[in-house]
Amino acid sequence: MSDPLLVSSRDNPLVKELRKLSQDNTAYRKAGRFWIEGDHLCSAALQRGVLPAVAVYAESFWANARGPLADVACKRVVVPDALFRDISGLESQAHIGFVLNLPDEQGFDTQAATVILDRVQDAGNVGSILRSAGAFGFKQVLAIKGTAALWSPKVVRAGMGAHFGLRLVEGLDATSLEALQVPLVVTSSHQGALIQELKLPQPCAWVMGHEGQGVGPALMSRASVFARIGQPGGEESLNVAAAAAICLHFSSLGSR
């Protein structure tokens, strides 16, 4: 493998692209590729067989780099530590980053166990839900327009590598989900049985709604099952990411 390219200018075209990908939530849509950084995320991509188009290293990291993280890309770039900090979107400095091509556009599987994000706006919540989906065997996540950008830097970081094992489709509207052939399950604070008392359909599509407004009327009207999460402590509601983790866990128990 050839030696890495040394880049030290802030005005280098690649550096400009990296800065935009790491700091602009929707830049990936136009570029067709996205940025991840840090040992954990980069290793998670490799473990799923996702290889980078470009691997970028801080000089201090490259000096001692060995193994898969050092030998993964046809194009490898080394930059000064200060320039890597300028590119990075993290408060605590990472020393390695990958540019990855977005997966090819694809439709959704109409019969798959699915999580639907109905205008969930907080990037941390979205990433956490993706992580729970992957952990509990839901391989498909569909995002309604108004949901935080699925491949944005904050969502990718919060997903902790879950992106690489999921089929992700975003920019949908509620009517397009009429093609789904699995029943929709919605959580509600005022209707439905307690989740632990339900026999949940398998497979199904769990709908997680907007942090303030909840699930919209179009999807609510199509729900086959309503589930309540008991809150004996008396809180008014749960964070949507916490609720999703509980729901998907219960759903996975029923699939065994």
Image (cartoon, rainbow, N blue to C red):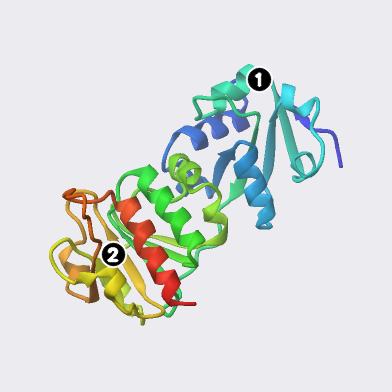
Q: Which mark is residue 153?
A: none
Observer able to see residue 11:
no
| Rendered location of residue 86, percent (x, y) | 55, 22
Residue sitting at x 72%, y 32%:
77
Amino acid type, callout 2: Asp
Q: Quadrant of residue 164?
A: bottom right
Q: Is residue 140 left or right of residue 38?
A: left
| Rendered location of residue 132, percent (x, y) | 45, 57
| Rendered location of residue 182, percent (x, y) | 36, 80
Mark 1 crowd level (few <14, some 14–19, many ≥20, 10 Å Cα): some
Q: Is residue 183 above or below residue 146?
A: below
Badge count? 2
Residue sitting at x 65%, y 28%:
95
Q: Which mark is residue 173?
A: 2
Quadrant for the N terminus in the image: top right
Amino acid type, callout 1: Asp
Q: Earlier in the sequence, mark 2 or mark 1?
A: 1
Circle 2 sits in a helix, a strand or a loop, which is it? loop
Q: CA distance from mark 2 to mark 1?
A: 43 Å
Residue sitting at x 53%, y 30%:
19
Residue in front for this viewpoint, 27 or 239: 239
Mark 2 crowd level (few <14, some 14–19, many ≥20, 10 Å Cα): some
| Residue placed under numbered mark 1 in the picture | 81
